[in-house]
Amino acid sequence: MKSGTEKIRLLLPVVGFLCFLAFQFLKSEPDQITDVNTFLKTRLAELVRAFDENSNGELCSEELLSWYHAVDVGDKANELKLTWENSDKNADSHVSLSEYLEGVGFLAEDQGFLKTTRRRFVTADKDQDSLLSKEEFAIFLFPELAPDMRENLYKEEMADRDKDKDGKLSLYEYLGVSEEEFSNSAQRHSIQPHIQYFRSRLDIDHNDVLTSNEILAWISDDKRHLREKSEKLLKKIDKNKDGSLNIEREVLDNFKFFSEHELTRYGDLLYYQDEL
């Protein structure tokens, strides 16, 4: 039997070799990090330039909106795939209302959610067989994409916002605040962008009230939330205030910000751009 000293002596070459490997790894790690960052920045440049339609090295507001929209379409496709797989319990290529509700768990206990879901399901069920095909299921999940689902969206918006049930939306109802909350200076400051959006984009006749036609026009714009996001991002990143983002100075120089942003799907698109 070998003594403890002999065991240590035999292990010394192994320990030395492991230390050598660790040193080599630590020595090369900064280079590896630099290589990864260079690769990811190159991928970000490729991704951004795909939306630079006129190849002028700038992203205007509409090109930025196109980027948001492309990511949103991909996200919707992924959500549709996952939700369909979770809902089609018996794998018969159709989803019943009970199958869908079983898949959403505790949400099915909420009466408001249940009412909205049933109304959407009936409208999306074009052949009225009490089952949704994959195409019907898509407009059930994303009714803003289908013109004939917009009446449902209108009802949902009005049920949530129209507190006095007069068929119109005041500025307060649109914002979801009381007059007292609106009058509070701090609260008003926080909702100022929404006030501006209401008055400049939605209230066509500028009377601080949205009529049914104005509301329908608003909910028919399936890119409205993306437009709000792109305008907010443009305002934040556009340092020289020229209304566009310079790809080199304002996008690639903000690599860390964009690599952690939803526009790159939090970095995933820099590795797998073919998913977009």
Image (spheres, rainbow, N blue to C red):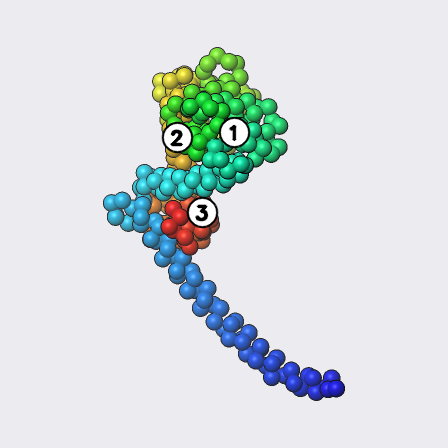
Q: Does residue 182 appear anywhere in the picture?
A: no
Distance in Å between CA atoms under marks 3 and 2:
22 Å
The residue type indicated by label 2 comes to: Leu
Return the x and y of residue 69 as percentages of the image width and height. 38, 39
Of helix, strand and loop, which one carries label 3?
A: loop
For the point 74% across and 84% down, the residue is 4
Return the x and y of residue 71 as percentages of the image width and height. 40, 42
Q: Quadrant of the N terminus?
A: bottom right
For the point 61% across and 79% down, the residue is 15
Q: Which mark is residue 8?
A: none
Q: Earlier in the sequence, mark 1 or mark 3?
A: 1
**Residue that label 1 marks:** 96
Q: Which class describes the residues within 10 Å of circle 3: few (<14), some (14-19), or many (20+)?
A: some
Q: Is residue 187 above or below residue 23?
A: above
Of helix, strand and loop, which one carries label 1?
A: loop
The residue type indicated by label 1 comes to: Ser
**Residue that label 3 marks:** 265
**Residue that label 2 marks:** 145
Q: Earlier in the sequence, mark 3 or mark 2?
A: 2
Residue placed most toward the observer, 272 or 48: 272
Of helix, strand and loop, which one carries label 2?
A: helix
The residue type indicated by label 3 comes to: Arg
